[in-house]
Image: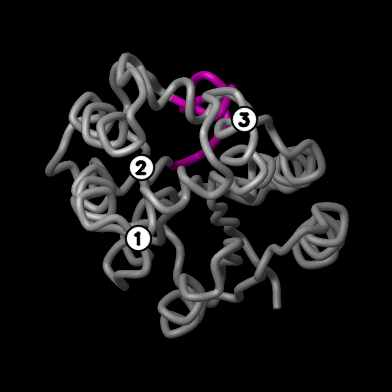
Amino acid sequence: MTYRGLILDFGGVLTTRMRLNGQAFERSEGLEPGAYFHALDEHPEGVRIYADLEVGRATQTEWNQVIGNILGIDPTDLMRRALANLRPEAAIVAAAQRAREAGVKVALLSNSFGLEPFNPYVELGMWEDAFDALILSEIEKVRKPSPAIYQRALDALGLSGPECVFVDDHAQNLPPAEALGIHTIHHTDNPDATAAQLDALLVRAAA
């Protein structure tokens, strides 16, 4: 199969691991280990505000306030502080660049962190010039794993499912893509291995 499109998740794929970032944030803010993850994943108000942020029903400033209140810390520009330890994942970024140079269209598909006042995509150099298409849940008003957002990624690239590869670090985000015929890769904790898979599927096939 000759693939013509690559769709990449942001946090934890194009960047370093989200859990490591969160743990570093807890240390920098003097929080108990696990407090940040509890606020995001288990606290009812934290779960609600993050879901609303991802689909544009809440602003990043509102997220800052709610999560800051849950954690008992200053909410000012909290998302910037919360993502301060994310870095580009060099191996994946380089593999995406090699794919583009080989003629593959590359899209960023992300459940959004909000874009104002802090835009993490711009901060890490992963904005419009770096991709052929940007699909952000905040703008689309729908988030992974809803099938609709994968279709919008395909539409943005002008490609069919079987022409594309999708990489995500959350296994639950893969089946809806597979249902559209997209070849999926579950990225875990080995960026070099994922990059090698991408090279084999995209760069060598195009050579």
Residues rendered magenta in the picture:
120-133
List the single residue furthest toward the left.
57
If you read the primary sequence from the N terminus, does the residue marked by circle 2 or circle 3 appear first? 3
Identified at 32% across, 26% down, the residue is 115
Question: Which numbered marker is on residue 76?
Answer: none
Residue 95 is covered by the magenta coloring: no
Q: Nearer the viewer, residue 70 or 89?
A: 70
Asked if marks 3 and 1 touch (Cβ < 8 Å), the reply is no
Q: Is residue 11 above or below residue 129?
A: below
* Position of the C terminus by quadrant: bottom right
| Label 1: how many Cα within 10 Å (few below 14, some 14–19, many 20+) | few
| Label 2: how many Cα within 10 Å (few below 14, some 14–19, many 20+) | many
Q: Is residue 118 above or below residue 109?
A: above
Q: Label 1, on which residue?
A: 42
Identified at 33% across, 66% down, the residue is 151
Q: Is residue 196 left or right of residue 51?
A: right
Asked if marks 2 and 3 touch (Cβ < 8 Å), the reply is no
Q: Which amino acid lies under the numbered mark 3 shown in the image of this protein? A: Arg
Quadrant of the image occupied by residue 155: bottom left
Identified at 43% across, 85% down, the residue is 179
- Residue 50 percent coordinates (x, y): 28, 47
- Residue 153 percent coordinates (x, y): 39, 56
If you read the primary sequence from the N terminus, does the residue marked by circle 3 or circle 1 appear first? 3
Q: Label 3, on which residue?
A: 27
If you read the primary sequence from the N terminus, does the residue marked by circle 2 or circle 1 appear first? 1
Question: Which numbered marker is on residue 112?
Answer: 2
Could you say whether the residue bearing mark 1 is in a helix, strand or loop?
loop
Task: Between label 2 and label 1, give the one nearer the viewer.
Answer: 1
Could you say whether the residue bearing mark 3 is in a helix, strand or loop?
helix
Could you say whether the residue bearing mark 2 is in a helix, strand or loop?
loop
Q: Which amino acid lies under the numbered mark 2 shown in the image of this protein? A: Ser
